[in-house]
Image: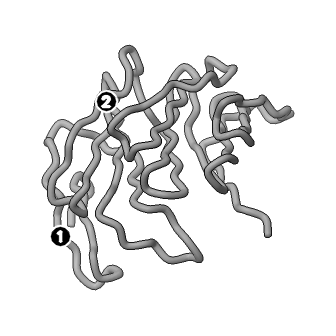
Amino acid sequence: MDSKSSYRTLDSGSSWTRLYLEASLTLGEIVTSGIRRAQVVADPNGIIVGQANPSYVLTTKDAGNHWSRQFVANNIDRFWGMAAVEPRSVWIAGVGGAIFKTYDGGSSWARQASSTKRTLYSLSAANLMSACAVGARGTILVTIDGGNTWKKQFSKDKKDFVSVTMVQSK
């Protein structure tokens, strides 16, 4: 394996097959069906966020054998983060506070008002309604209504937050 290629496994990592994507693509995050009870759920649907100019999203419906580039929006330089709790409902976020959500596995995307212009580097979702996004200069945004509203959370730390994990409470 080399560091500039992407691979997939269908047998919990015993063997790997190279994914042949466009050579010019720089991959960000990959989401399949999400994680449930610490096991990745087998599903043929997947989404890749790309970091190029303009940013792109790739989707697959056949476990990565074929990938299709999906249009998300004009003038978005980079998507950095992605979160999914099930294959059809996915959030992506990036430069300028951009947040988009799909309800159909990536065929169409709706922009959500994030209330920030700062770059968002990471997203995490606990369920279909609750998610958190973090980013530049201590930015923290939370939604509890599926992304209809994103509320800023106070942070004393003004460093970039590059990762977030949200878990569902029992």
Residue 27, by quadrant, is top left
Type of amino acid under label 2: Ala
**Quadrant of residue 169 within the rendered picture:** bottom right
Where, quadrant-wise, is the C terminus in this rendering? bottom right
Task: Indicate left or right for 160 with 151 as reference.
Answer: left
For label 2, the SS is: loop
For residue 90, above or below residue 20: above
Q: Position of residue 26 (x, y in %)?
A: 28, 40
In the visual, does 144 lie left or right of 47? right
For marks 2 and 1 on the same chain, the one whose residue lies earlier in the sequence: 1
Which residue is the site of mark 1?
17
- What residue is pinned by disc 2? 52
Q: Secondary structure at mark 1?
A: strand
- Left or right placement of residue 143 versus residue 23 in this view: right
How far across and how far down the image is residue 134, in percent? 66, 38
Q: Position of residue 3 (x, y in %)?
A: 26, 57
Q: Residue at (62%, 22%) from the top-left corner?
A: 113
* Residue closer to the observer: 119 or 62: 62
User: What is the spatial separation of the Cα atoms under label 2 and label 1, in whole angstroms?
Assistant: 24 Å
The type of residue carrying mark 1 is Thr
